[in-house]
Amino acid sequence: MEDEIKSIVQEAKAAIAQSDAVSLSVTAAKFIGRKARLTQILRSIKEFSAPERQKAGSLANRARGEIEAALLQRKQELATSAQRSTMKRDTTLPGITPEIGHLSPVTIVTNQLIGALTELGFEIAHGPEAELEAYNFDYLNIMPNHPARDEWDTFWLRQGKDNKTSVLLRTHTSPVQIRYMLAHKPPLRIIAPGRTFRYEAEDATHASVFSQMEGLMVDKGISVAHLKAVIVHFVDRVLGEGNQVRFRPSFFPFTEPSFEVDVRFRDKWLELMGCGMVHPQVLRNVGIDPEEYSGFAFGVGIERLALLKYGINDVRLFLGGDMRFVKQF
């Protein structure tokens, strides 16, 4: 089994490296699609004994993460190549110097986070930005009379008769976790990047539209130790190795225990994100037995990471459209 999985990864990486923009999706389907051999291995794991299941699952998930990371890298390479190709200098137009575009710092940090987490076996999951009230609040243990709802000033699109007809712009990407848990059985390991919306008075540190990356892992025996290891790993990848990370007790309705994460960056302790162990009631809400499974979840604001990484002092610059700002990265 181990040799077969290694062979699949080697074959996939070789095929990805040779793929062009047209054939890359075919290559992806071949190696991580529904009919792919690696997918078949993941589906057959349930038939193994417990020790074999754990080892095979770890190998297969790691292999899938490597293949997805290779696909993402190749996609970025092809996009860059295509962009450069279309923007080559036309020598018949003297005095015009084509300029290659620049990635936003939010895009740069998002790609770094995706790379750091997919190599740990996390899959990328997406959900709608216009979300049902039930998924945005109720399934997450935030009931209509819960005081935590006061923390989210919400853009309502439709006030329905109940929580499954009321629609809002999602205030976090946690609903993606709910949708995924309702559609899949453990073990689960996903990240959910995307835009979120809150009705806020905008200033240097607050924005009504911002990007978030949430992560979720649910399996047997998951503990705070796993949570800490994952967070330290992606902090090292994005901000550089050697920064101290600390966890402070906090409260979130959807995790228990809950933590705020601080990082010591450039000789200062700075609040980075929230996280915790998935609340047992949240697991029950999606049909997962908390006596059998446990999990952790975290949510980090991508703009917040970019602010720290690049020393930016105003969050409004990210959506300001000022090319002088974007060209610095």
Image (cartoon, grey):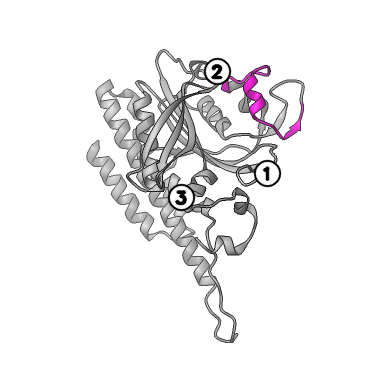
SS at badge 2? helix
Residue that appears at 30% across and 45% down = 8
Mark closer to the chain start, 3 or 2: 2
Residue 189 position (above or below residue 22): above
Measured from the top left, where is residue 45 in percent x and y? 33, 28
SS at badge 1? loop
Disc 3 from disc 2: Cα separation:
37 Å
The amino acid at mark 1 is Glu
In the image, residue 234 lies in the stretch drawn in magenta: no
Viewer can see residue 262: yes
Mark closer to the chain start, 1 or 2: 1
Which label number is shown at residue 309? 3
Q: Nearer the viewer, residue 72 or 95?
A: 95
Read off the residue under disc 1.
202
Q: Nearer the viewer, residue 177 or 75?
A: 177
In the image, residue 157 lies in the stretch drawn in magenta: yes
Q: Say few, some or many: other residues with alpha carbon within 10 Å of mark 3 (under 14 / 14 to 19 / 20 or more).
A: some
Range of residues picked out in magenta: 140-159
Q: Where is residue 63, by image quadrant?
A: top left
Say which of marks 3 and 2 sits in front: 3
Viewer can see residue 68: no
Q: Say few, some or many: other residues with alpha carbon within 10 Å of mark 1 (under 14 / 14 to 19 / 20 or more).
A: few
Residue that appears at 58% across and 19% down = 141
Q: Nearer the viewer, residue 157 or 233?
A: 233
